[in-house]
Amino acid sequence: MIPLSKGPASTEDDALLREALGKSTMFCTLDEGAIRKLMKHMMPIRFQSGDLLTHQGDRTRYLFVITEGDVRRLRYHPETGRLHHMETLGSDGSRNTVGALHVLRERPCYATTECLSDGVAYALAAEELRAVVLGDPKIAEEIMNALTNEIFNMSQRNRTPLLEQEGRPTNFLTISAAAAIESYYRSGVNAWLNSVLTKSPISNLFPNMHLQLPVRVLYINGLKGVREALNPYAQRASDAERIGLAVIPGVAMTPLSSVLEASNAGHMNPESMTTRWLRGIVPRAGREIVFGIGLNQLSDLMEERIEHITPKGTSKTLNNALGSVTSGLIAGYFSHIPHNLSTLKLMHPSKSYGELMTQMISDSELRAERTLGMRSRAAAMMLAFLAPRGLFVRSLQIAGSFTIINGLNYQFAKSAVSASRLKRKSSLTQGLDQR
């Protein structure tokens, strides 16, 4: 923080502050005279990217009006064990005021305010604001009116973007227990799905569980653990870099997933396990990327957004389950084509991917006639790619897996990492107290 004297230092700064106060939550209805009274008491500070203007739970001793740059509000929810983005504020929009609802009585800060860029904010101390308000009843009335309107319009909803979801820190024992339970569920439903795809009877619901169970435990811990290890890098990464970081867990776990799939295919593919696990590995990598993002970022996003829809008072456990089911259905849909290709390649290793895609389309001709009343190649192709065979079973499998894994992790994992990440540095408020 760079110390500056009170009030704008130049005509340009004066104009910027005047414009910002006109947009601010608290002072947007004040007249010119009232604006000038406030400006005399406001202290400019220059902040840098990564600085904290406020810290959740600290006493709100200053109100900040941003004239240059952008900040975001981050709130740690102990009941969910996660850090949520409330919304982004900045000089470009009308929501450029930090601490408006808490400063008069110096209530604890609702959220941490983290600077996303270099910029300038003007701080107004609580005691000086009180003096201005008590000394001019008209200002008090206008501020009360502005804050009342803000309460009517405000929405304290979590809005963390998909690729910025942090998730809960993983607990190896919890994830392992969840994955062990889920491995039996997955194996049974996967046998059902393979039966639907190959149009052959189910041979064994739980084949090679001595191999499937430990590999599945390693696989799920890997998806969660790699994501957690990459979280610190994702916080300051660009959007393109976040995409790359999001796909890494799925790519890294593709070999383990291939072993699991090969364990279920011995009745159709007599090749040795050392050869069989490589069949269909390319489309399987695409499937694992979708599965990894679905289990990690998308599940957290849907849990966060579900809270906007469910009735007030709905338990966090139910919101977690609904978020997992929703993300599972989405991930199941978008991963189904690569899943079908990888499964068919595993079952029929001698066929090329082109031949397998042709087979998928041909298999859909009868369905097209039965469901759409059309027996044409175009209709079959549409069904093969938009509503492929086994879609319901696959979506049910993924939704159930997400619910089991995320649900148990939510119930038993204890997290302090999200909150402690913002404890690494003090807020700029502490520097203002010394000026």
Image (cartoon, helix red, strand yellow):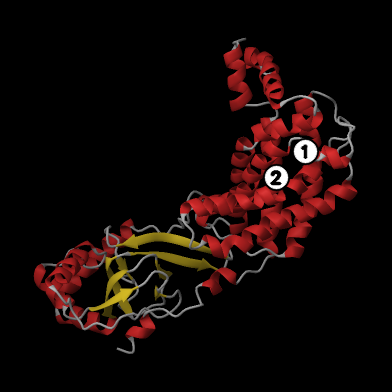
- Residue 90 at x, y = what percent? 31, 62
Q: Image check: 87 left or right of 228?
A: left
Image quadrant occupied by the C terminus: bottom left
Residue in the foreground of this view, choosing between 179 and 61: 179
Give the position of the N terminus as an image quadrant.
bottom left
The residue that disc 2 covers is 400
Q: Is residue 102 above or below residue 226?
A: below
Of 168 and 363, which appears nearest the observer? Answer: 363
Q: Residue at x 53, y 50 (%)?
A: 243
Circle 1: residue type:
Val
Residue 253, image x and y in percent? 71, 50
Could you tell me if the residues under marks 1 and 2 are in contact, i.e. CB atoms within 8 Å?
A: yes
Mark carried by residue 341: none
Residue that protrudes farthest toward the left in the picture:
33
In front here: 154 or 415?
Answer: 415
Task: Please rate how many residues cluster around mark 1, counting C-alpha atoms within 10 Å: few if below 14, some from 14 to 19, many from 20.
Answer: many
Say which residue label 1 marks.
189
**Residue at 83% across, 24% down:** 200
* Residue ranking furthest to the bottom: 434
Res. 206 in view: no
The relative height of residue 293 versus residue 91 in the rendered view (above or below) is above
Q: Nearer the viewer, residue 414 or 213?
A: 213
- N-terminal label among 1 and 2: 1
| Place of residue 291 in the rendered image (x, y in percent of width and height, measured from the top left) | 65, 45
Vertical arrangement, residue 177 with respect to residue 342, above or below: below
